[in-house]
Amino acid sequence: MSDSPQLLSGDEAIALAARHAGVRLGTGYPGTPSTEILETFDRLGGRAQWSPNEKVALEVGLGAVFGGARTLVTMKHVGLNVAADPLFTAAYTDLAAGLVVVSADDPGMASSQNEQDNRHYARAASLPMLEPMDSQEAYDFTLLAFELSERWHLPVMLRITTRVCHSKTIVRPHDAPVPGEAIGPEPGFRRDIPARVMIPAYAKPAHRRLRQKLTEIAAWNDAEGPNRVFAGHPQVGLIATGIAAMHAREAAPQACLLTIGLTYPLPLETIRTFAAGCERLVVLEEGDPVLLDALRAAGIPAQGKPEQYRFGELTVARVRRILAGDETAEPAPPKGKPPELCQGCSHRGVFEVLRDMNCIVAGDIGCYTLGVLPPFQAMDTCVCMGASIGVGLGLRHVLPEEEARRVVSVIGDSTFVHSGLTGLAEMVYNPPATGHVVLILDNGTTAMTGQQEHPGTGRTLNHDATGRIHFEDLARAMGVKNVHVVDFQAADGTLEGLLKDLLTRSETSLIVARQPCVLAAPKIRFYEKAAADRSTACPSQVVDD
């Protein structure tokens, strides 16, 4: 690892910092724009692994931290919803090593189903949050996050956004460790029941300790936090966080600018001092008026952006409009080519069948969500990861029988492992009177985010062979009445006939429609051949899946 200047994306900078910080384990679930962090960490020699979902990733991370190992957990913004359960309680525990939780937000919804602002999570979970504005700060703040985590024995959230994740800027790393040199103490377990077993008797004093920690962190943030003042004309003072700070520097280079790196808890006294020297104070932030509301609640008068700029990403042009008070309609963005399923994608045949059969389709999150678009228009709902099964069951429970028998739940292989298993359990436990049909589109990869592995592929993050979940065996073990596998390489007419039959039955049914992703297929064949070659060379290392 070189300590010379490097041109890195924010994701790559976080991965490099994690290596330099001595992170012993990186866990997460792939999701744009966070995916490249763990992939880069693995490429740099770190130990990284994909978990079935974000909740499990954070729980594994907590276990590693309780064992004394610095750990990085990564996810996109909606993934933090899944991980929220352990996150909130983790704030009460006293960690034995540094834990950094990366939330990669997606303003503008470039690849997401909502535009939530995860700064709200820092306040809700009572956890410190750092927000870098470029790759250098992504690197620096990752190192700082581990220091703060270990100083106050708390998880620290690192919030990045799409523009920071994928834009590249120069990073000047700190002194890189010598390859093979251990960083930090060796992992080991130290029993501390009151700090880690959150029954009410221990959680009540832990909550008080947490509030005291936040008071101390706020004082530290005022005294020496990662906040910077760029001098300028006092007529206009700007306060900005994250990528908005970069836009502010370009849009109004003559203005005074305060950039805040640790955005929760805020350095309120620093802000008061800065505000006192400005004739007009404007807050620039993407998304919700989180910072503006906090300043106003603290009695610091400030202006925010008009409501129209709450949606989508900020840009230099939009910042200039905000500062000018321009609330006229913005120019319409140029029309782009609508996304579509790849030519040759096996999902196309599935959605043609669902369309032609006039099914009511409860859909899910993945590249197959594009089945909602022409020429298929064969998806009627899409809420969140794994929701297709529960939503489909709800429709089945209440619709008249004729309509209920048209309902099909469609879910991808990675999404099924992520959040579909509990839906399948619900189907077995509370079956509708008309039964139900779940269709898993198994293309052998997590295609939408860049062809990552998952527990149903039989390969780890770095594509080595490992144990594999067989969906059809799992469904039978869980009690699904009818389980079928359709190989789309030789499936002409098979799916339609099978669906027609199952939709008439008042029984629970699962169809696995299996064909490798057309883009991933060559790689999958390469990985499988490499695994077979290793197995032949070292028979004792064969993995039984």
Image: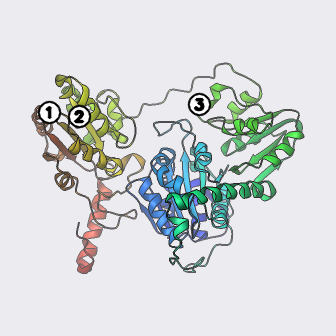
The alpha-carbon separation of the residues under discs 1 and 3 comes to 42 Å
Q: Are marks 3 and 2 in contact (CB under 8 Å)?
A: no
Left or right position of 234 against 173: right
Left or right position of 238 against 277: left
Question: Which residue is the site of mark 1?
Answer: 503
Question: Which residue is the site of mark 2?
Answer: 408
Question: Which residue is the site of mark 3?
Answer: 311
Q: Residue furthest top?
A: 328
Task: Give the amino acid type for the residue marked by disc 3 in the picture.
Answer: Phe
The alpha-carbon separation of the residues under discs 1 and 2 comes to 9 Å
Q: Is residue 540 above or below residue 146?
A: below
Left or right position of 191 against 256: left
Q: Residue furthest front?
A: 201
Q: Are marks 1 and 2 in contact (CB under 8 Å)?
A: yes
Which mark is first along the chain, 2 or 1? 2
Residue at 18%, 27% in the rendered image: 357
Question: How far from the left and from the top, in percent, is residue 9?
Answer: 59, 54
Viewer-side label of 1, 3: 1
